[in-house]
Amino acid sequence: MRSKKWSVLLAAALLVSMILAACGGGKDENSSKDSTGGDAAKSAEQVLNFINGDYIPSMDPSKVTDEFGFQFVGATMEGLYRLGEDGEIKEGIAKGEPEVSEDGLTWTFKLREDAKWSNGDPVTAHDFVYSWQRAVNPETGSEYGPYMMAGVILNADKIAAGELSVDELGVKAVDDYTLEVQLANPTPYFESLTTFGTFMPLNQKFVEEHGENFATTEATLLFNGPFVLDVENDNQHITQANQWKLVKNENYWDADTVQLKEINFVVSKDPQTNVNLYNQGEVDRAGLSADLVDQYVSHDDFRIVPDTAVFYLKMNQVRKGKETPLANENIRKAINNAIDREALVNVLNNGSIAATGLIPKDFVHVPGGGDFREENGDLATYDVDAAVEAWNKGLEELGVDSIELELLTGDSEGAVQTFNENLAYQLEQNLPGLKINIKPVPFKQRLDLNTAQDYDLQVSGWGPDYLDPYTFLSLFVTDGGNNKMGYSNEQYDALIAETVETSDADVRYNNFLEAEKILIEEAGIAPLYQKGVTLLQSPKIQGEIVNKFGARYEWKWAYVAE
Amino acid sequence: MTQYILRRIGYMILTLFIIATVTFFLMKLMPGSPLKAEDKLTEEQKQIVLESYGLNDPVPVQYVRFLGNLVQGDLGISYNFDNTPVTEILVERLGPSMQLGLYAVLIGTFFGIILGLIAAIFHNGFWDYTSTIIAVLGTSIPSFVFAGLLQYIFAVELGWLPVALWGEPKHMVLPIIALAIGPMATAARFVRTEMIEVKGSNYIITAKAKGLSKSERVWKHGLRNALIPLVTVMGPMIISLMTGSMVIEKIFAIPGIGEQFVTSVMVNDYPTIMGTTLIYAFGFIVILLIIDLLYGLIDPRIRVTGGSK
């Protein structure tokens, strides 16, 4: 009997010690063993290895909607212009500056004659006409086509709605190398728009030859950008490939500038796995989740890359046709002032910074001035005294002594969840009598509830689609498609409307500055944070540009340092 | 026998039809649309795209159209992956998942049976406790914990195997071990319990009295009987492993179906959800049929015959 007990103990002890030994190792190991050896030879070679966060759902420029689609369309194709450092407009297929008519509505682009498709065909003005028509053609079923072009290019909205035929679109080829565009409104940021995936040219003959199969395999893709996409199996559906390459395009008109020979990609989604791959020297960059940031914050290769997406609290004033307590300006102001944004971004721990307005930092410059964010200052501040004062005034005006509000959020776990809980806690702590009920739902359901305007408070975000404050500020005009919170201010509407009609940069920016002040000062929304990205990145990557919208990375000028 | 199989196939088709119908209508209850830029489009723009997907038709019309295509073996085009037929996705993604699952089940049950046998033979001894502890840990610790542990020890610390990725045989080792621990523990537990029970049964005592050696008793008479309950649980286990484990696939960056299925639900990719569900259901039913037929091989007493009615 005694020996039996001993054997149980012994067996258990053995196993436990084995497991503990395995776990224990994790604690004291740290950045001690980075990429060891073998790298010296690699670094001279112009090759990079990256992880891609997901598969590429589409390579058809007219149909792309997601981050990775835009990334690889951007790397393999070229529109009229490309984005350089700090959003600077660089020449693409267009040569020099466009000629713009006095009313700002007719834009004429001269195209370079040495640009070629990867099959040797020249890239001409007809390719742009065809592509843009295809993007707004309802038969294409494009989501971004109508979204990007309606209200910008003449008749795009009516064509998308099936009211006009596609050849009524305001774009025509004057000759092979001259493109004339008629805009619906003067759109001073139009050049930056043409760098976006949806505006890439398409070779009509090629697209029609492949019909439904166009852009599904390597063999049914045609490129005109700095790189070509290379999948090991030529006939594999690109959307199903879990690894692929970008290879320098020798037919690219500016191939001399492109230094990278090859960029390899592999799909991997688990942050811990990605960091392990990075530490083994398999890849040159790995994103870090909040829990990994603490572990790697002092690593030599740790980087914070700012992003231009902004998150804010939407305050719904009219829920299901009935006014909510948030229709009261003092209540909204109280909430806006009761948020300690610095504490919240510490919870996120991913390089995000406190947002003090709707327009992100380092996004656009005011003409002849500094950064938009700096020019307009910190509009949203943490001020508990002001918050409580406004709160009590608001309660008095409403004739109540307590308010219960629902906070609609996403359902992700981890840091984001803690963020939401902290936000609710801050509001309840700082505003006596306020009760917040968090309602976490999946993304699609949140969109449904937002569309139905069925919520009180909602954590929401927006990433820009072009280089102009309009991409953010147009969200909250009265009855705007993305307003969905009953916010309405005549003065705000008038200011935004004027920015559409005029091409005078000073007038536009003054209006934008003014409009943002109105929106935040009367607390239509409460800004929360501007997103950041934390990662480990090899110092050998040089000259890579992080774009402010569209394709996230620009590799045309990138190279591997010795 | 033939009649029995034919009748079973008839039931299979009925079951698949019911599953397809229930899934179809449940799917329509999910919030949101398959649109990808839903938050950016105006109501009219949304309607135009939905129209092109045929999603503006009444649900019964969509249902009939879906069934019509299904009968012709057409699972449709994915809403998430541009112009990619669902069959293409299934073919691409099932491959890795099935490979891993099959190896994991084979290796897991093999070692599980051995572990269970050892435990039963040395009942209440050191080896019994060791194997029981392994089995308990294997059942109670989720496979992703093992996956993380294995990745850390064998890839990060020792550097014997790759951290993750897919393509070469060496990439399969760690995921297979991580997946095999579950079936191993289950098999060990079943075999141990059954063997201990069988050991005390009359026919084993008879065999012993007849003078059969221990190994003959264990292998020829004992194990065969002890395997029956194991075969029952093996079916669902095989199919759930072969249709992919979302977590293991994520940790080892494997292009499998498990992870893809979860993604398709998140983005309302209706055709892919349907296709994956049906393949899963189909595999499940087929395996159950095979298991039922296998019973007969293992135990002649429950052999199905034409005259079983």
Image: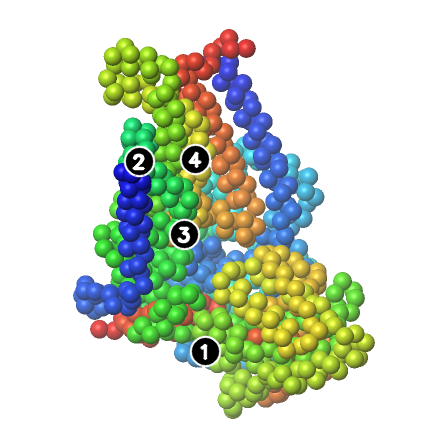
**Image quadrant in which you'd find residue A87:** bottom left
Q: Which residue is mark 3?
A: B250
Residue placed farthest to the front in the image?
Answer: A2
Mark 2 against mark 4, which lies toward the viewer?
Answer: 2
- Expressed as whole percent of the image width and height from the top left, the position of residue A96 reads 44, 79
Mark 2 against mark 1, which lies toward the viewer?
Answer: 2
Residue situated in front as seen by the camera: A498 or B156: B156
For residue B103, the mark is none
Q: CA distance from mark 2 to mark 1?
A: 79 Å
Q: Amino acid at mark 3?
A: Lys
- Expressed as whole percent of the image width and height from the top left, the position of residue A36 reads 21, 65
Q: CA distance from mark 3 to mark 1?
A: 35 Å
Q: Chain of mark 4?
A: B
Badge 2 crowding class, 10 Å Cα cut-off, few under 14, some 14 to 19, many 20 or more, is few
Residue in the picture at 39% in, 66% down: A292
Determine whether B80 is above or below A75 in the image.
Answer: above
Label located before the other in sequence (2 or 1): 2
Q: CA distance from mark 2 to mark 4?
A: 38 Å
Q: Which residue is mark 1?
A: A87
Q: Amino acid at mark 2?
A: Met
Badge 4 crowding class, 10 Å Cα cut-off, few under 14, some 14 to 19, many 20 or more, is some
Q: Chain of mark 2?
A: A
- Expressed as whole percent of the image width and height from the top left, the position of residue B151 reads 31, 53
- Expressed as whole percent of the image width and height from the top left, the position of residue A353 reads 49, 77
Residue in the picture at 53% in, 60% down: A412
For residue A1, the mark is 2
Q: CA distance from mark 3 to mark 4?
A: 20 Å
For residue B237, the mark is 4
